[in-house]
Image (tube, rainbow, N blue to C red):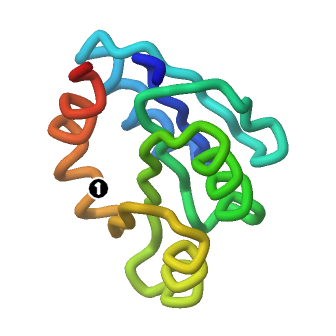
Amino acid sequence: MGTSILILVKDLLLSSRITTAAKSANIPFTVVRNPTDLPQQPAALLIVDLNLPGAIEAASAWQRSTSAKTLGVVSHVDSAAIEAARSAGIQTILPRSQFIQQLPQILQSASVP
């Protein structure tokens, strides 16, 4: 497993919040904007915007090939995306507001070997 995180998020505001927090925690990261560009490299964690078209499928494939943790971020009202992510085996799914509140702890747990 890698020590960096992958961030599959197209939304610039959300991406900026994650990368700023990762920089503050000295955690290396790679940002991917398009699900088809998601590298199949190991990482400590994949953070994925479940509202991004094609992201659920890409995250599920990544998770299966790397056996690493995946955390999905979603609008709390998008029950279809939540159900699709659960069906695809995404381990943790958080509404955006809860994700932002817990971001420092999430990154800290991802950086622990």
Q: Is residue 1 above or below residue 45?
A: above
On the image, the x and y values in percent for residue 58 come to: 72, 53
Which residue shows up at 44% across the image and 60% down it?
Answer: 73
Which residue shows up at 60% across the image and 43% down it?
Answer: 8
Q: Is residue 64 above or below residue 39?
A: below
State the residue in front, 91 or 79: 91
- Give the side of residue 28 with respect to residue 61, left or right: left
- Give the side of residue 24 with respect to residue 37, left or right: left
On the image, the x and y values in percent for residue 25 come to: 24, 17
On the image, the x and y values in percent for residue 87 come to: 57, 79
State the residue in front, 34 or 108: 108
Residue furthest to the right: 36
Q: Quadrant of residue 98?
A: bottom left
Q: Quadrant of residue 85?
A: bottom right
Q: Which residue is mark 1?
A: 99
Local SS, label 1: helix
Which residue shows up at 71% across the image and 32% down it?
Answer: 40
Mark 1: few/some/many CA within 10 Å (<14, 14-19, 20+): some
Q: Quadrant of residue 7?
A: top right
Q: Is residue 53 above or below residue 86?
A: above
| Image label count | 1
Which residue shows up at 45% across the image and 74% down it?
Answer: 75
Quarter of the picture containing the C terminus is top left
State the residue in front, 58 or 103: 58
* Residue type, mark 1 in image: Phe
